Structure formats: structure tokens, C-alpha cells
């Protein structure tokens, strides 16, 4: 069993869960996810994916991987515009992230605020 970022994959049973909820995947979707999650944090080239998932050394279609990747992301609930699970490394391949990436145009979450402290100010009056 492999587990990365709340995605659990049982390769022997060919089953997938996200945060404890089972997700049904086609054979190719499962194979694509397995090829990526079995190498967390590593870039997997499109050539490797075509060889390992589609058992071919040639491109059947330039969009084959992208279409299946879109289905996998959708089923896992990953944002296609700012994915936190499977990211595209332009010109290199795909990577299953060990931790969610930080995007420059999205502010980092604010640190937990300290508990509010209530202070009363007592002014002493002086006799004139």
C-alpha cells in the first residue's frame, strides 16, 4: 500500500482511496496514477508514461496522457489549474507531489493567530 497526501493505492488489489473514500478508476487511470505515485517527488517523463502505462514507444496521440491525467485529477478532486497532487513540470514530465506546492500568486496561509488578549486600561485620577 502506498500513501501520499491522503491518496492511498493498493497496487495488488488495484484500488484507490482519497482521504478514506474509495475511488473507482479505469485500468489506464489506475496505471497512470500508479506510475506517478510509486515515484513520489520524482519527475516522470511522458516517454516513461507511454512505455509503462500504454506499453508503447511511440505516441498514439499527443493528448492521450493529458486526457487521462485530467480524468485522474478530477476523480482525486485535484484542481486542474493549481494542482496539489499531480503537477506538470513543463518540458520535463509529471510529478506526484509529496507535499502541496506553493503558488506565487496565491498568498501563503496566515499563521495561526495568537489568542486575542483583552486589556483594560485604568487611568488614575489625581486630586487637584
Image: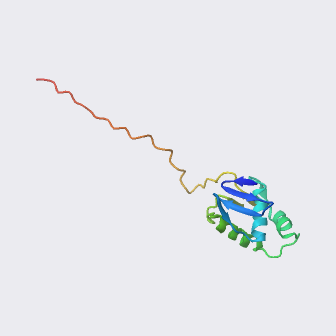
Residue 42 is situated, as x and y percent measured from the top left of the image, at 77, 54
Q: Residue furthest top?
A: 127
Residue 7 image-quadrant placement? bottom right
Residue 91 visible in image = no
Tell me if 19 is positioned left or right of 59 in this view.
left
Q: How many numbered marks does the figure carry?
A: 0
Q: Quadrant of the N terminus?
A: bottom right
Q: Write the residue at 49% across / 44% down.
A: 112
Please name whichever residue, 17 or 34, is drawn nearer the observer in this view of the structure.
Answer: 17
Is residue 127 positioned above or below 75 on the image?
above
How does the figure colour the protein chain or chains?
rainbow
Please name whichever residue, 102 or 104, is drawn nearer the observer in this view of the structure.
Answer: 102
Q: Residue furthest front?
A: 13
Q: Residue furthest left?
A: 128
Tell me if 56 is positioned left or right of 65 in this view.
right
Q: Write the residue at 78% across / 54% down.
A: 39
Q: Quadrant of the C terminus?
A: top left
Tell me if 57 is positioned left or right of 109 in this view.
right
Residue 119 visible in image = yes
Residue 27 is situated, as x and y percent measured from the top left of the image, at 78, 70
Residue 105 image-quadrant placement? bottom right
Residue 32 image-quadrant placement? bottom right
Please name whichever residue, 79 or 61, is drawn nearer the observer in this view of the structure.
Answer: 79
Residue 108 is situated, as x and y percent measured from the top left of the image, at 55, 50
Please name whichever residue, 65 or 5, is drawn nearer the observer in this view of the structure.
Answer: 5
Q: Write the residue at 12% across / 23% down.
A: 127
Q: Write the residue at 44% across / 40% down.
A: 114
Amino acid at each position: 500500500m502506498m500513501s501520499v497526501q491522503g491518496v492511498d493505492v493498493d497496487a495488488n488489489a488495484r484500488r484507490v482511496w482519497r482521504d478514506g473514500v474509495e475511488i473507482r478508476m479505469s485500468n489506464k487511470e489506475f496505471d497512470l496514477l500508479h506510475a506517478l505515485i510509486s515515484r513520489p517527488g520524482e519527475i516522470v517523463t511522458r516517454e516513461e508514461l507511454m512505455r509503462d502505462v500504454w506499453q508503447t514507444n511511440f505516441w498514439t496521440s499527443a493528448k492521450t496522457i493529458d486526457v487521462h491525467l485530467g480524468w485522474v485529477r478530477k476523480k482525486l478532486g485535484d484542481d486542474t489549474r493549481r494542482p496539489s497532487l499531480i503537477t506538470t513540470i513543463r518540458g520535463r514530465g509529471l510529478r506526484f507531489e509529496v507535499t502541496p506546492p506553493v503558488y506565487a500568486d496565491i498568498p501563503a496561509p496566515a499563521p495561526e493567530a495568537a489568542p486575542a488578549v483583552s486589556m483594560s486600561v485604568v487611568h488614575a485620577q489625581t486630586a487637584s
